[in-house]
Image (cartoon, helix red, strand yellow):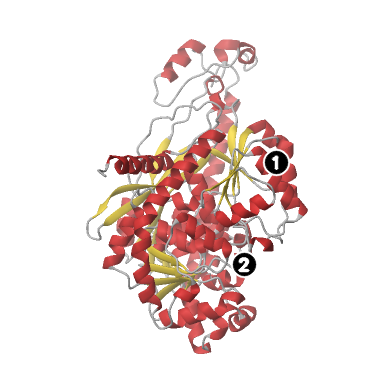
Amino acid sequence: MGDVLGYARVPTGDQGVAGQELRLREAGAIQVFSDVRSGRSVERPGLGALLDYARCGDTLTIVRLDRLGRLLAELLATVAMLKERGVALLGLEEKIDTSLAAGEMAFHVFSAIAHFERRLVAECTRDGIGAGQGQASGSAGWSLQPPACRARRGAGRPGCRPQLLPEPKRRALGPGGDLRCRRARLVQRRPVLRRRVVGRQSCEPASRPQSVPGTVRDHKQSTLVKPYGQDTARGWPSFTIIQIRYETDMQDAGCKAVGILGNAGRVAQHAFLTTAEAFGKTGRNTGNLAFMYGFHHCLGEEAVTASFTFDPAWAAERLRVLCIPAANYLYRAFEFGDLATRIEKSKLPVLIAGLGAQAGRSVAEVKLTPGTERFLRVIAERSVRIAVRGRFTGEVLESYGVQNFEILGCPSNFINPALDLGAQIAARFAERSERVAFCPTFYEHNAHFEARVYREIAAEVEEIVCQEPLSALALARGERDDALQAWIAKTGFLQFLPAADKPGIVRKMRTYFGIEPWLDASLRTDLLLGTRIHGVSVAWQSGRAALLVPHDLRTQELVETMGLPHLAQNAVPRGAVLEAVRAAIPGFAQTYDTKRLALAARFLRLMEETGVRPSAHLASLAAGAKATTLERVSEPA
């Protein structure tokens, strides 16, 4: 028998989801996910988090069908997807349970009726509007107040800044000239910035942020993690996700924005995509979402997201800086010539962070294609400094004649706002360390080591985090076919494990197409042991202990730069894997905080020198580095 999961939705924060949550809890829901969104909105982070969390045998419970979606096609698609994943739908009002044949039939009937009612209301509304417009032949429907009066009336409303249109345009609007212009056309209202806390009922209006010279705010939702108290029962800080929506500010329309390549650390509507489609949007590794999310987290102004095939003319017209959250671009199989050409044509300055080189054992292995070599030279010309992952990548850049670089690690290191994150993790880890997660590469050259480790810790492992390849993600999403069974039998560390153990291993596999659900899921465990750097980084940023066993130079340099716990493969003893890991983590946690705050201060300085406004979150970490330095200076000799 699976778990009962609840989903609540309200269109505005003023309504609150408390009533729905109460009914869902009474129905047996162990966890309730919620959204403050219109039913027609395609962005529903709460629903996405629920679908990430749900597993085969679970039941998704809603108060009414329209909470899940208002369009018939959307409802049918969602239920079909749930059925494919083995998740049932339970509607409390309609008493529908799709795990039963009669319930599935009733669902289709009620969905069709609800869709018909909405269509009927919409048609009646349009007919009424049309009839009213037909009767308004003269001054009906037109405001007879002078423009100045209308401007004064709008000026007193919070968040509303009236603005008159130019005189020639006012004359052209209606048969009555100035006095008969439609008020909606004459007065333009400024939107109000509202702050909504996900999962909480309050929806407080926030003051409108001051315009920053040279910036523009678009319709976009950004997210940041903010501490809201101390969990006294467990002894470590608890966090809430704050979502801020910035509405378009037309006053800044003439200014240029910061552009950023990639996405904001999540694949939109991934629950409705095939695994191959969602995987492709991550850059074919879900770990890429971590540094994209981290980079967005460090920006103190709204950014325009652009694809790697952006139009250079559009970028030159709209953007003032191009930000690139980078990965291991410096690799012999990668070709970045097209991106180099687009950057050259845009003539924009570049802020690139997290650039890495990929090789097994030495710098000599890094042989760049002509296009990637040109990309390296272009970003060197257009960057104040290139922020690279570690000393190994720095050596590669020097071998190609590039000197303006700085070792700063990865932006994913700055996700958590706590200044003493390492100390908090060490304190918690001393009390609890029994629930373990495993994050393998599934690479052939790593297979023997990963198989040895897994055999020893299998009894403690509750979750196996999968970042790639595609087959692993498909299994984690509940897909099963002959090709996947063949992959399990012959790929990576799985090939060295008994066939009888593999069904249990597959049931433990998890994957995430958004960093926030990934961070939240990490809270279920006490320790993550892995050979993937971003799997370890995400677990650590969630406030849980983690340790990396590097398998090549790219992972080795990054874990050393960020100061995360790590052990070489030959330092992991046979028969005592967890004992060695538990002994190593406290020592790294003591030095991690100082190193991390210093990196944050240097990254903030690079952003300011490039002309990009850093976030208050990053500034707080940088200020922590300065405070630490002052404390050291003031200490008696």
**Of pointers 1 and 2, the one earlier in the residue sequence:** 1
Q: Residue at x 73, y 51 (%)?
A: 373
Quadrant where the image shows the C terminus: top left
Using the image as rendered, state which of residue 27 and residue 216 is in the foreground. Answer: 216
What residue sits right under mark 2 in the picture?
360
Q: Residue 221's spot in the image, x, y percent?
A: 49, 43
Q: How many marks?
A: 2
User: Horizontally, is 218 left or right of 330 in the view?
Assistant: left
- In the rendered view, tell whether residue 148 sits above or below residue 621: above
User: In the image, what residue type sits under mark 2?
Assistant: Gly
Q: Residue 592's spot in the image, x, y percent?
A: 39, 55
Pointer 1: residues within 10 angstroms few (<14), some, or many (20+)? many
User: Horizontally, is 338 left or right of 511 in the view?
Assistant: right
Task: Name the quadrant containing residue 618.
Answer: top left
Q: Residue at x 45, y 39 (%)?
A: 615
User: In the image, what residue type sits under mark 1?
Assistant: Ile
Quadrant where the image shows the N terminus: bottom left
What residue sits right under mark 1 in the picture?
343
Q: Residue 455's spot in the image, x, y percent?
A: 45, 83
* Name of the residue lying farthest toward the left: 232
Q: Residue at x 58, y 36 (%)?
A: 258
The answer to whether residue 525 is visible is no
